[in-house]
Structures are given as structure tokens and as C-alpha cells.
Image: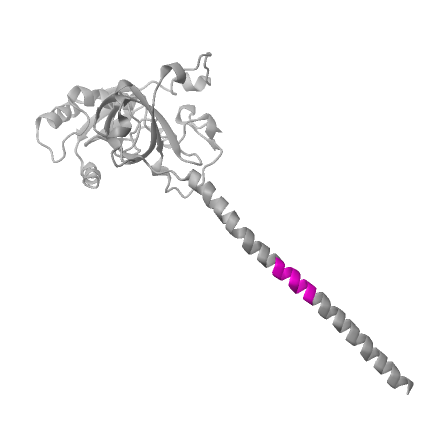
Amino acid sequence: MSNIHEVKDEITRLKQECNELRDIFDLFCNDFNNSIINIKNTLPNFTNKLNSNTELLHITPIGVFRSCFLTKNGTPRQPSICKYARGVLQITAFLNSFYSVMGLEQYSHLWVLFVFHKDLTTKHMPRPKVAPPRLNGAKVGVYSTRSPHRPNRLGLSLVKLDKIDGDILYLSGVDLVDGTPVVDIKPYISNYDVPPERSFHPDWIQSSPSQTLTVKFTDSALNDIRRIFSEPFEYKMRFIMDEEELRQCITDIIEADPRSVYRKRQGNVEFSFPIDSVDVFIRVNESILTVTAVKQSEYVKMLLANKV
């Protein structure tokens, strides 16, 4: 009999434990359901806040820049290197965009804020240190340079405003590649844009490159330049007006050395770059860079055909 009573007591105890576990489980389920409800109620507010912040970061180009520089290769690294380097910007931000530039003709220069769109396709994340060409391989922090390899890929150039025709701006002294998205323009005002205090910068900014380059033209190249403006070509020059401007433009670009650090380390290797509607071919012999030909190559024709 005693065993039966012990079994009954054990059953009763187990029932009590089961009831207690059921109560604990019910409490857990209730807390879990309340947590889910709280998450559902909080998520829309968080999403709205996230969307609101995202909208603040959303930028739409005000126009696309059309330039004499068809590719990154040969494009000056800074504005004003070549005064005959021209381009046009048509403002498309408004229905009547010509109203947005009223009064702008009273300024001589503009700040152009743009996107380095040619670097958006890179598979590599920007790095905190870069090697500016003028430092010949030495590295500094990206924010102490104007390198295009930066987290937000934004560039800033000071250019000359030549004229305005409706909503189209004609600019010179540019360093933008054809097709560059422009996100804003602002007039240059010397009263505010030139600091009242003495400005300074690192010595390497003002120092000359590793070697001074001498630019020469072969007789054949000079004849090429003459023919470009005297004979019919499939594609006419779009921005450069005459022989003198083209010769000076080529000289300015080469003297600033458009080659990368890697290309310069290769030594006396021939290279070329497109400008306006022609391709420029250069032979390298130490510090003497000789223009050997200026012609409308098939490569340039292909580039221009894609832009028509």
C-alpha cells in the first residue's frame, strides 16, 4: 500500500510541475507576442526615418557635361592647365532651365561640382591613402589630395564662363571628361572664395614634377594639324577653333604629363590620347616628348560615333 501512495504522490507532484511549466510557457509566449507587436509598431517609424535620411542624400545631376576630352586618358588632372580646353553644359534641372542661369553672365568663373563617373564602375573600394602622380609613388591621405578615388566620387573644378546661350553654358579651362554628370554650379566670388589669411599648402604641390618635359612636333605632325582644319574629315573639330589652339592644347597637356606613375616607370614607351575629334601620338625619349602624328584614328571615330 505504501508504494501505491508514493506513486500517487509522485504523480501529483509531476502534475504540479507540468502546470508550472505550462504557466511559464504561457508567460513566455505572451512576452514573445508583445515583443513582435512592438517590433511591428517600431519598424514603420524606423523605415520612415531611414527613407527620410536617404532622401536628404539623393542627388540628381543638373546636366551632363560635353567636353573636348573623350576619355580619362589625356584629361588634365587640374582645371586651367589648358585654357583652350572647352566644353558645354546644358542645364536640365528645371522645365524652364534658362531662368535658372539668369544673371550668371555677370560672373567670369564658376565652381563646377561633379561626379567622377568613370570611377563608379571600379570593383575596388577607395583606400584612405593614395599616391598623387606629382609625388612619384609616395602616398598621402586621400583627403589631402584631389584624387578621384574617394568614397563619394565628387569633384570640384574652377572654370571660365565664356558665354551663355539659353540654358547652355560654354566653359573653358576645363578638366572634365565628356559625359560627366554635373550636380551643381556656383559663381566664383573672389571676395569670399579667396581666404583673407595667408594660405599655404605642402611643398610638393608647388614643386616641379620629377623632370621638366620638352614637347616637340615632327614636321609630319604639324602637317597633320594643318590638314585637320583645311581638309574635310568625317568628324569636325567641336571645341578647338584653329591650328594654333590645337598645337597649344597638345603642348599644355603633355607638359603637365598626363601619364600615370605606372606608365612613367615603363620608360620610353609611346602613348597616345584623344582630344576633341583627333588622336595624338607621342614618342618618349627621356624628358623629350615628341608628337609624331595627329589624326582621326578609328578609335576616335568609334568614340565620337557613340556620342552622336
Asked if the magenta segment contains residue 236, the reply would be no
Q: Main secondary structure of the magenta part?
A: helix
Left-right relation of 155 to 200: left
Q: How many marks?
A: 0
Residue occupying the point 59% across, 55% down: 38
Residue 28 seen from this side: yes
**Render colour scheme:** one colour
Left-right relation of 212 to 230: right
Above or below: residue 60 compared with residue 18: above
Task: Find the residue positioned furthest to the bottom.
Answer: 1
Q: Name the one closer to the observer, 163 or 50.
A: 50
User: Could you say which quadrant of the image residue 111 lies in?
Assistant: top left
Q: Position of residue 183 (x, y in %)?
A: 34, 33
Above or below: residue 119 compared with residue 211: below
Magenta range: 26-34
The N terminus sits in image quarter: bottom right
Above or below: residue 271 compared with residue 256: below
The C terminus sits in image quarter: top left
Residue occupying the point 47% across, 28% down: 143
Task: Find the residue positioned furthest to the left.
Answer: 231
User: Could you say which quadrant of the image residue 303 lies in?
Assistant: top left
Residue occupying the point 46% across, 45% down: 51
Residue 79 seen from this side: no
Left-right relation of 142 to 19: left
Q: Position of residue 299 (x, y in %)?
A: 21, 38
Q: Name the one closer to the observer, 202 or 63.
A: 63
Q: Position of residue 201 (x, y in %)?
A: 46, 18
User: Could you say which quadrant of the image residue 85 lies in?
Assistant: top left
Residue occupying the point 72% across, 68% down: 23
Asked if the magenta segment contains residue 29, the reply would be yes
